[in-house]
Amino acid sequence: MDSLRINKIVADNGLPKFRKGQLTKAFFSEAVDSFNEITTFSKDLREKLTEQENVLTVTLHKLYSSTAKNAHKALLKLEDGKLIETVLLNPKPGLWTTCISSQIGCALACDFCATGTMGWIRNLTSEEITDQVLFWRFFMKQELKDIQLNNVVYMGMGEPLHNKKEVFKSLDELMNPDTFNMGARHLSVSTVGLLPAMKELTDKYPQVNLAISFHAPNDEIRLGMMPINKPYPIDKLLEGIAYHLDKTNRKIFIEYILLDGKNDSEANAFELGRKLKTLGKKHLIHINLIVYNKTDKDLEATSRDQAQLFKRKIEEQGLSITIRKNLGRDIHGACGQLALKEPNSVKATRSSIEEILK
Ligand code: SAH
C-alpha cells in the first residue's frame, strides 16, 4: 500500500475524496492491516475492498526471531510467488531499524556476500520495497504494541542503485508527509558505488545517508573481492565520495568488512586511512568495521584482537571508526547472510558487470 495505490482505490471505486484521508490514516497512522478493520467504512465497502485487493503486495511466508528478540527476519512472498527477506532490528531500547531488500538476488557477485551467489532475479517495485516497512509496522503493532519505526536502511538483498528508478520512488514515498512521513536523515542507502547513480542520489537526496561498501584499501585487493571494482576502481569511488561530501557537507559511512588475512593487516589499515584522508574533511568520514558473517564461502572473519588493532591504526590517523554491532546472527539475518535457502521459482541469471552498466 502506498499513496499511489490509495489514489487508485479511490478513483477506481468512485469514492468521495475524504475516503483517501481515511485510508491513509488507517494504514499509515494507525497501522491497521486490513480493510475489514477500517471502522469508518461501511460493512459493504469493507467487504468489497477486501474482495478486490490485498493491503500489502507481500505476505508472510516464514518468520524467524533471534533468542534475544532484538532481531527478526521475515521471508516474504511476493505476488508472483517469489521470496525476499527483510529484517527488523532493535539495536537499543526504543530504537527500531528495518533493513530492506531492493532486488530479488543481486548481480554484483561480491565474493563474501551470500545474496551475490543467487544471481539477479528481478528488481522490486517501489511498493514492494516500501511494503517491507509497512509489514514491519503492522508486525510491531501486533507484537510490540508500538509502531514507532525509526530508521530504514537499504542493506538487505540487492544493490539499491542497480534498481535506481524504483528505489528513488520508494525514497519519495518513505518521505511522503501523507504516508510514511520519515525524515531523510532516518534513511540510509548502501551501495558498492555505481558512480553515475550515486551522483544522482547525492543530487536528488542530499539528506539521505550514504554508505559505501569500500571493503579494501587498494584496487588489487578490492578487485579480488568485488568485480565492480573493475569499471569503478578506488580512485573513481573516491571522486564520487568527494562529490558527495562537497555537495552535502554531511557525514559519509565507509563500510569495511574484515576478512582474515585478506584486508585486515596493519598495513591495510594504514593504506585505507591514507586514501580516505586525501578527501580532506576528516570529520565527515566515519568507518564502520563489519565483522564477516560466515556464508558458504571459504573465508574467515578477522579475530577480535586483529579487529581492535585495525581500529586503533585507523584512529591513530585521526579518523572516526566503530565496529558494527552484529544482531541476528542466529537467524542468518545479519548483513550478507540474506540468501534464500528456499529456491525461488525462476532460475537466477548471472549478469555480467558490463550488462549492469548499460
Ligand atoms: N548492495 C549494497 C547493499 C547490501 S549489503 C552494498 O553492497 O552496499 C549491506 C552491507 O553488508 C554491505 O556493506 C555488504 O558489503 C555487507 N556484507 C555483505 N556480505 C556480508 C557478510 N557475509 N558479512 C558481513 N557483511 C556483509
Image (cartoon, helix red, strand yellow):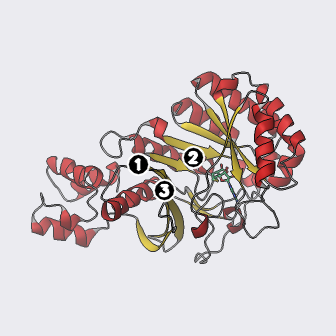
Measuring from the top left, give residue 57's x and y in whole percent: 40, 64
**C-alpha separation, residue under disc 3 versus residue under disc 1:** 30 Å
The answer to whether residue 218 of the structure is visible from this angle is no
Mark number displayed over residue 164 = 2
Question: Which label's residue is closer to the chain start, 3 or 1?
Answer: 1
The amino acid type found where label 1 is placed reads Gly
Image point (36%, 56%), residue name:
137
Question: Which label's residue is closer to the chain start, 2 or 1?
Answer: 1
Q: Which residue lies under the disc numbered 1? A: 94
Residue 303: image quadrant is: bottom right
Where 333 falls versus 207 (above or below)? below
Q: Which residue lies under the disc numbered 3? A: 125
Question: Neighbour class for label 1 at 10 Å: few (<14), some, many (≥20)?
Answer: few
**C-alpha separation, residue under disc 3 versus residue under disc 2:** 10 Å
Measuring from the top left, give residue 352's x and y in whole percent: 76, 58
**C-alpha separation, residue under disc 2 versus residue under disc 1:** 31 Å
Residue 240: image quadrant is: top right
- Quadrant (top left/top right/bottom left/bottom right) for the N terminus: bottom left
Ligand 1 within 8 Å of the CB at mark 2: no
Quick one: 306 or 5, which is closer to the camera? Answer: 306
**Callout 3 touching callout 1 (CB < 8 Å):** no
